[in-house]
């Protein structure tokens, strides 16, 4: 098996058309690091969790600052959102997206430097932290992800995540972006948000507080826990090392695309 930070020809063929054009060179100097090599450097940092300044030069991926700038520019241009949509279209055209239900959950990560979208975590002695909110379809394929402070209530991200699901085409007819049923644990138990979900034509199946365990939702909710585990398999996402929230969101979006691409390789 090749190293996971080496970009395959198939993946590069999907990413290259989405990248913004190379900016004109203002003054002479060293040649620009090719985008594919810079992407390999970004993936190396994502997989290993190494600091940018310690990116080994002998790998030929350019400096850590070059890769950092390229990641910020591509995220600002919306490359990861468009790549995610391309991958979802491939899955839907192959009939491999399960719209019968969706599952939502979140996970806490410690924020080493404080910054935007971080806050005192109620599960970590009020230390600074952030939350990864994930919405997946019935098989665990991620549909939308978001980042908030560690002190944000999970249920507040339910409408934003549903609104963030892209309209996925790939079959004859109108693009689809709404599941039939939404499953969630007790953290999302609030009648106000149930009504908001119903208004969108989605049936909420949410466990209620104060009720004995045995709702049997675990038979369906485990897929989102697997997806969160895959996200945290990327070492850079286990702890938030970035003060800037957009850089951490860029890593989160890239990791989401990589997980979706694994499903494309397996199912398509």
Image (cartoon, rainbow, N blue to C red):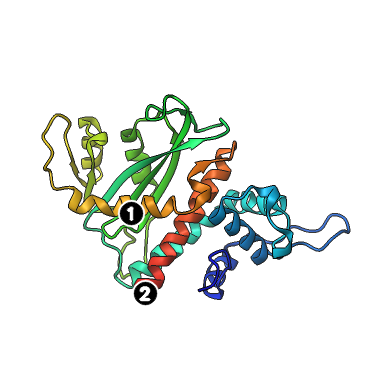
Examine the rendered structure and indicate whether residue 251 appears above or below residue 28: above
SS of the residue under disc 1: helix
List x then y, in percent, for residue 116.
Answer: 54, 32
- Which residue is located at x 59 percent, y 36 percent? 243
Gap in angstroms between the C-alphas marked 1 and 2 = 20 Å
Q: Quadrant of residue 256?
A: bottom left
Q: Which residue in the protein does label 2 denote?
A: 268
Towards the viewer: 49 or 41: 49
SS of the residue under disc 2: loop
- Which residue is located at x 55 percent, y 34 percent? 112
- Which residue is located at x 17 percent, y 31 percent? 209
Report crowding for label 1: few under 14, some 14 to 19, many 20 or more residues within 10 A (C-alpha): few
Towards the viewer: 180 or 70: 70
Mark 1 or mark 2, earlier in chain: 1
Q: Which label sits in the foreground, 1 or 2?
A: 1
Q: Which residue in the protein does label 1 denote?
A: 226
């Amino acid at each position: 098996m090749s190293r996971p930070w080496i970009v395959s020809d198939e993946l590069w063929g999907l990413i290259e058309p989405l990248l913004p054009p190379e900016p004109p060179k203002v003054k002479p100097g060293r040649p620009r690091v090719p985008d594919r090599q810079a992407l390999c450097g970004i993936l190396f940092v994502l997989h290993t969790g190494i600091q940018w300044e310690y990116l080994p030069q002998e790998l030929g991926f350019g400096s850590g600052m070059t890769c950092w700038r390229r990641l910020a520019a591509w995220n600002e241009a919306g490359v990861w959102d468009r790549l995610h949509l391309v991958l979802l279209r491939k899955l839907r055209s192959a009939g491999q997206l399960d719209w019968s239900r969706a599952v939502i959950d979140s996970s806490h990560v410690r924020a080493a430097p404080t910054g935007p979208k971080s806050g005192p975590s109620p599960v970590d002695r009020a230390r600074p932290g952030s939350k990864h909110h994930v919405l997946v379809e019935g098989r665990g394929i991620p549909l939308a992800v978001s980042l908030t402070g560690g002190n944000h209530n999970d249920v507040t991200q339910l409408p934003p995540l549903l609104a963030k699901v892209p309209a996925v085409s790939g079959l004859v007819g109108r693009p689809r972006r709404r599941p039939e049923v939404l499953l969630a644990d007790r953290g999302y138990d609030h009648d106000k948000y149930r009504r908001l979900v119903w208004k969108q034509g989605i049936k909420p199946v949410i466990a209620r507080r104060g009720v004995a365990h045995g709702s049997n939702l675990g038979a369906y909710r485990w897929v989102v826990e697997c997806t969160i585990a895959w996200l945290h398999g990327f070492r850079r996402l286990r702890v938030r090392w970035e003060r800037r929230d957009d850089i951490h969101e860029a890593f989160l979006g890239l990791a989401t695309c990589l997980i979706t691409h694994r499903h494309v390789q397996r199912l398509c």
